[in-house]
Image: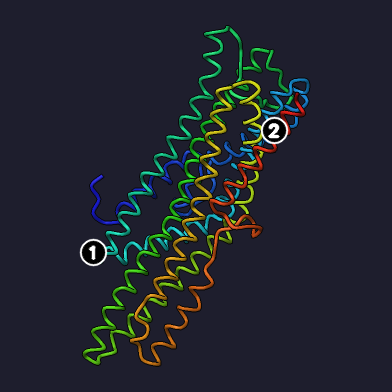
Amino acid sequence: MNYTVSYDLYIHNLNYIRWCANAVGMDVMAPNYKPIWKTFVALVAVCVGLLGEFYSIWYFWTDVVKLMESAAIYALMIQGCTKFYTALRYHDFFIAMYGRLDRFHQEHRTHAKNNAALLLLMQRVYLLTRLIGVQYAISVTVFGCIPPLAYLVKGERMLCFSLVIPFTDTTILSHYFLNLAWQYYILLLALAGFSAAESVILLFVGSLAGYADVLKNEIDELNSILQDADRTGDRSMVKQKILKIICLHQRILEYEKDLEERYSLNNFVQVFSVMLTLGGALFLCIITNSITMYTVVLCVAIQLFELCLLGTILSVKNEEIEATVYNSLWYLMDRSEKSTFLILFHRSQHAVEMTVANMGSLNIVLFVTILRKIYGFTMMLMNFYG
């Protein structure tokens, strides 16, 4: 990976996301994007799963373990549906965000210090998106290997997970293979869809760190210009740099606001679904020692940690911006420059944070709190089951 310009690596990361999204017919960056046959096939498969949960409750009514497993998978499916709906309903938002980042990297590709900071950021995004893909690939592989291994080792017909197509009976061979084919397709959808969705939010939130680093570099340059202007008496460069910094900070605030508005509901659904999935899967790990449930627990715990970590990164970068503004050489400005710079002081104190449907901040504290609640919920289930 021998990239020297952040823009080129940004395009590389974007192409990876588009490749994953195209597998489910959701490549919104395609010219004149419209849903294609892949989109409708994925939509039908997911709707079958949503309806299938109610049938599965009746089908597995006497088996508490299978009921808990189907509930855990159903919670993940609801999360996937929310991401699918967001991308389909608000595809203009994603195009606008990609356009913003495209212009941002283009603007700073010739600035050595800014390009270096953005290049390092894109390298980290590249690494993390591949790790996310590997995480989901391993999880899908574990689920996919269960049916053939069960048949080879025990001679039993097993499904990947306890969720069946409505009005089918898996004891009938043709119905079993129909359910198995549908489940394999759902696993492939999950692999491509979740990889794309998690990589997108990582790219969007991670890019805010790039915005913050560039803003700090601009303020450092302003400090140098202020020192030079104090000696020479030429204030023209100072005024230009202050206006440039204020415009850049305004872009950051608009970017954060749009990101929070669009992802607030998604964050709520994701946190809620992860709580249900973790609670059920952890209970099944203790009761059945199932490798698939261990895989689910590990996968969704990492997913929740990634989401809360991104919220923490956003808060930390906002604090860094505020500290950089306060530590600038503002006292070397004249009266008109200070009044203009005061706008930046004020706005830096009212930064936007990622929230869970405006009910609480998304950060590592929330992650720890959720894990504690899930532990308590699991212990309650254990007492009930015992």
Judge whether 134 appears above or below 254 on screen. Answer: above
Residue at coordinates 32% horizontally, 49% vertically from top-left?
Answer: 123
Mark 1 residue type: Ala
Quarter of the picture containing the N terminus is: top left
Mark 2 residue type: Met
Is 201 or 220 nearer to us in this picture?
Answer: 220
Residue at coordinates 34% horizontally, 74% vertically from top-left?
Answer: 219
Please provide percent x and percent y for residue 70.
Answer: 67, 29
**How many neighbours does mark 2 have within 10 angstroms: few (below 14), some (14-19), or many (20 or more)?**
some
Q: How many marks?
A: 2
Question: What mark, if any, has residue 112 been given in the picture?
Answer: 1
Task: Please identify, in this view, whether the residue under mark 1 or under mark 2 is nearer the observer.
Answer: 2
Quarter occupied by residue 158: top right
Judge whether 307 appears above or below 161 on screen. Answer: below
Quarter occupied by residue 134: top left
Please provide percent x and percent y for residue 350.
Answer: 54, 72
Labels 1 and 2 touching (C-beta < 8 A) = no
Is 125 or 58 nearer to us in this picture?
Answer: 125
The residue carrying mark 2 is 379
Say how the picture is coloured.
Answer: rainbow
> Tag 1's secondary structure?
helix
Is 176 or 266 nearer to us in this picture?
Answer: 266
Residue at coordinates 34% horizontally, 80% vertically from top-left?
Answer: 329
**How many neighbours does mark 1 have within 10 angstroms: few (below 14), some (14-19), or many (20 or more)?**
few
Judge whether 358 appears above or below 68 on screen. Answer: below
Q: CA distance from mark 1 to mark 2?
A: 55 Å
Question: What mark, if any, has residue 8 been given in the picture?
Answer: none
Please provide percent x and percent y for residue 227.
Answer: 26, 83
Does label 1 or label 2 sit earlier along the sequence? 1
Quarter of the picture containing the C terminus is: top right
> Tag 2's secondary structure?
helix
